[in-house]
Image (spheres, rainbow, N blue to C red):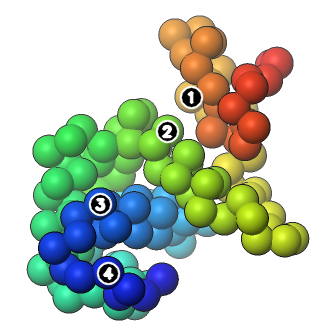
Amino acid sequence: MDQSAPPEDALFWRDEVLEATYWMLGEGIEEAVAPDDLRGFLDADGDIIERTFADLHDRGLVRDTSRGYVFTDRGEKEAARRFADEFADIQGFDASHTDCGPDCWCHDPDHGTDACPSDHEHHGHAH
């Protein structure tokens, strides 16, 4: 991930931060992601990352903890979709942390009609 967009391109940076955060949390690299944690992955000024996290917080996609940001349910779903879309065309891509597990929110009856983030085709799946 690199700074291939100007700092004012909020949508670009929103995608980059969501995807990098999703990857770090999904792989167990971090339990919560702080802006400093992404500086090694994103070629962006620290202010851009901090503003982006603030924007994601305002949009209800992340919540702040004492260790950094974690996803809300809505944020995790959005990040999973963007992550899968971004890397779907890479031959041999292993989306292991986007695969459904026993703790996936999609097992909650309240989300029974929502597409699971592991369903890359968005056709739903049986549990």
Q: Secondary structure at mark 1?
A: helix
**Residue at the location (72% across, 59% down)?**
88
If you read the primary sequence from the N terminus, does the residue marked by circle 4 or circle 1 appear first? 4
**Residue at the location (69% across, 32% down)?**
122
Q: Secondary structure at mark 4?
A: loop
CB atoms of marks 2 and 1 within 8 Å: yes
CB atoms of marks 4 and 1 within 8 Å: no
If you read the primary sequence from the N terminus, does the residue marked by circle 1 or circle 3 appear first? 3
Crowding around mark 3 (Cα neighbors within 10 Å: few <14, some 14 to 19, many 20+) is few
Q: Secondary structure at mark 3?
A: helix
Q: Nearer the viewer, mark 1 or mark 3?
A: 3
Which residue position is annotated with label 4? 5
Q: Hey, what amino acid is under mark 3?
A: Leu
* Real-space Cα separation, disc 2 to disc 1, in angstroms: 9 Å
Q: Hey, what amino acid is under mark 2?
A: Lys
Q: Nearer the viewer, mark 2 or mark 1?
A: 2
Which residue position is annotated with label 1? 105
Which residue position is annotated with label 3? 11
Answer with the quarter of the image where residue 41 lies.
Answer: bottom left
Identify the image quadrant of the C terminus.
top right
- Give the side of residue 54 with respect to residue 109, left or right: left
